[in-house]
Image (cartoon, helix red, strand yellow):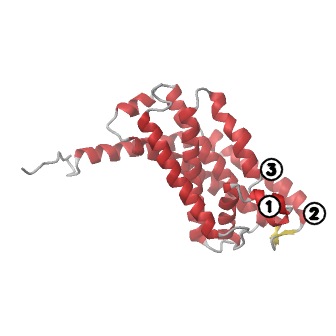
Amino acid sequence: MATTRTLGRSGEPSLARAHRIGLETIVRREYGRIIRIWGQTLLPPVVTATLYFIIFGSLIGRRIGQMGGYDYMQFIAPGLIMMSVITNSYGNVVSSFFGAKFGKHIEELLVAPLPNWLIVLGYISGGVMRGLLVGLVVTLVSLFFTHVPVHHPLLVVASVLLTAVVFSLGGFFNAIFAKNFDQISWFPTFVLTPMTYLGGVFYSVSLLPDWAETMSYANPILYMVNAFRYGFLGASDVSLGVAFAIMGTFAIVMFTVVVTLMNRGTGIRE
């Protein structure tokens, strides 16, 4: 006996249409949140990046000279852009999803006909949007201080997208387990920030002592920053193949883990 599917007015299966509308709703809400509070989401990275360029680029950079064959301001520009993408992708999802838990409106999503992987995808899309918007704004700021060439545009796009996805998933993971606002700030303060500063944003790891250089290769952010820098400058301290393998693996594994935790109701039904 043939089975039939319920179709909407557009001829689209009703369940697929519900999924599409649900995803669009989450993404639009996240985008609206980013734009509505632009003074908290877009303006602070501009101020921070400007200070970095003035202090590290203009003042200290004159004394340093060149780094990796490039003017120091050019060298740090990709790192500062990526640092902004990392912190804002992470921060957007951890604050938004925890806010949904804290305000109890996460329950509206849980009872909706949406699979958990779609809910995760919606929040991750919001984190990626904020990361890319901030990255674009910081890039524009950098152009006021230095010329940043783009040698490999596709590598720039691929590396920034993968990085934004990875840290958006990291923010979601943090938000699942967080029970109060202090717990959503602990990881960025004591783990993410040190890893970012030690990830080759302001220096080439080839300048470090052998033991410190070896330790640096255990930092995944080093690979993300260098893959992004290679897209701009054509120079990297790490293998691009290894860098993209690490980013891709982190994205797949973290997405699987986060969806599994959602399916189990960890942190949201306790």
**Residue type (three-letter) at the residue carrying disc 3:** Leu
Residue at 30%, 43% in the rendered image: 18
Label 1 and label 3: CA atoms lie apart by 28 Å
Q: Earlier in the sequence, mark 1 or mark 3?
A: 3
Residue at image mark 1: 213
**Compared with residue 57, is residue 23 higher up or lower down, i.e. above or below?**
above
Residue at 58%, 42% in the rendered image: 171
Q: Nearer the viewer, residue 265 or 29?
A: 265
Residue at 77%, 56% in the rendered image: 215
Q: Looking at the rendering, which quadrant does residue 14 occupy? A: top left
**Circle 1: element type:** helix
Residue 32 x/y as whole percent: 50, 41
Residue 262 shown left or right of residue 98 in the figure = left
Q: Nearer the viewer, residue 147 or 217?
A: 217
Residue at image mark 3: 51
Residue 111 shown left or right of residue 225 in the figure = left
**Residue type (three-letter) at the residue carrying disc 1:** Glu
Residue at image mark 2: 63
Residue 117 x/y as whole percent: 41, 45
**Circle 2: element type:** helix
Number of residues whose C-alpha sits closer than 10 Å to that of mark 3, classed few (under 14), some (14–19) or many (20 or more): few
Residue at 64%, 31% in the rendered image: 183
User: Hey, which residue is sitting farthest right in the picture?
Assistant: 63
Q: Is residue 53 visible in the rendered structure shown here? A: yes
Q: Earlier in the sequence, mark 3 or mark 2?
A: 3
**Circle 3: element type:** helix
Please state which of the two labelled residues, at mark 1 or mark 3, is closer to the viewer.
Answer: 1
Residue 125 x/y as whole percent: 49, 49
Label 3 and label 2: CA atoms lie apart by 17 Å
**Residue type (three-letter) at the residue carrying disc 2:** Arg
